[in-house]
Amino acid sequence: MVSALSSSPSFPHSWRYDVFVSFRGEDTRYNFVDHLFSAVHHKGINTFIDSNDIKRGQELSSTLVAAIEESRICIILFSENYASSKWCLDELVKILECKHSKQQTVWPIFYKVDPSDVRNQRGAYGQALAYHEYRFHDNMPKVLCWRAALTEAANLAGWSFLDG
């Protein structure tokens, strides 16, 4: 993965960050994400990793949206509770919008989750989406957008770490 960053062709777009990482803090902040950040930072790769948890009721901050838009590569770290966070799902939708509009590279990593559970919204992902359907019953297009984004992202080539 790191070598792919250094050998990628230059893009006409000017990127502020090499990499943006979307992750569920409670699952991965103090283990996988810390190790990932340390490894890429050591290689001199400019990486945006949100160090602040978004509080309940807040929307994605303009800082996060800008960081996604200004990143050459977005890594989506799917973990058990990723889909239970509406903010993670909103980040995912924004990342895929930028993939289509800015030709960003998107790399999914499946950390202790089966890619088919993400793709088909089964297990913890199915439970999380069922809860979102209940909670956002007056905004079903948003939930359908999240479902489509999960399916699309899970169909991308990526890495799976089922055992951590």
Image (tube, grey):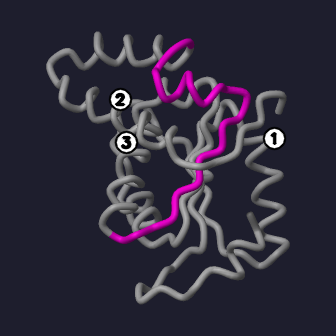
Is label 2 in a helix, a strand or a loop?
helix
Q: Are marks 1 and 3 in contact (CB under 8 Å)?
A: no
Whole-percent x, y for residue 41 in the image? 78, 70
The residue depicted at 56 percent of the width and 25 percent of the height is: 116
Location of residue 79 (image quadrant): top right
Query: Which residue carries the number 1 mark?
Result: 31
Q: Earlier in the sequence, mark 1 or mark 2?
A: 1
Quadrant location, the N terminus: bottom right
Is label 3 in a helix, a strand or a loop?
helix
Which amino acid does the dot numbered 1 rest on? Asn
Membership of 109 in magenta stretch: yes
Whole-percent x, y for residue 51 in the image? 62, 52
The residue depicted at 70 percent of the width and 72 percent of the height is: 4
Query: Which residue carries the number 2 mark?
Result: 147
Is label 1 in a helix, a strand or a loop?
helix
Which of the two residues, 18 or 10, is positioned nearer the viewer here?
A: 10
Which of the two residues, 152 or 136, is positioned nearer the viewer here?
A: 152
Q: From the viewer's perspective, is the residue at label 2 or at label 3 nearer?
A: 2
Q: CA distance from mark 2 to mark 3?
A: 11 Å
Question: Callout 3 environment at 10 Å: few (<14), some (14 to 19), or many (20+)?
Answer: some
Membership of 110 in magenta stretch: yes
Q: Which residues are magenta?
A: 102-123
- Kindly identify which numbered label has been placed on residue 90: 3
Q: From the viewer's perspective, is the residue at label 1 or at label 2 nearer?
A: 2
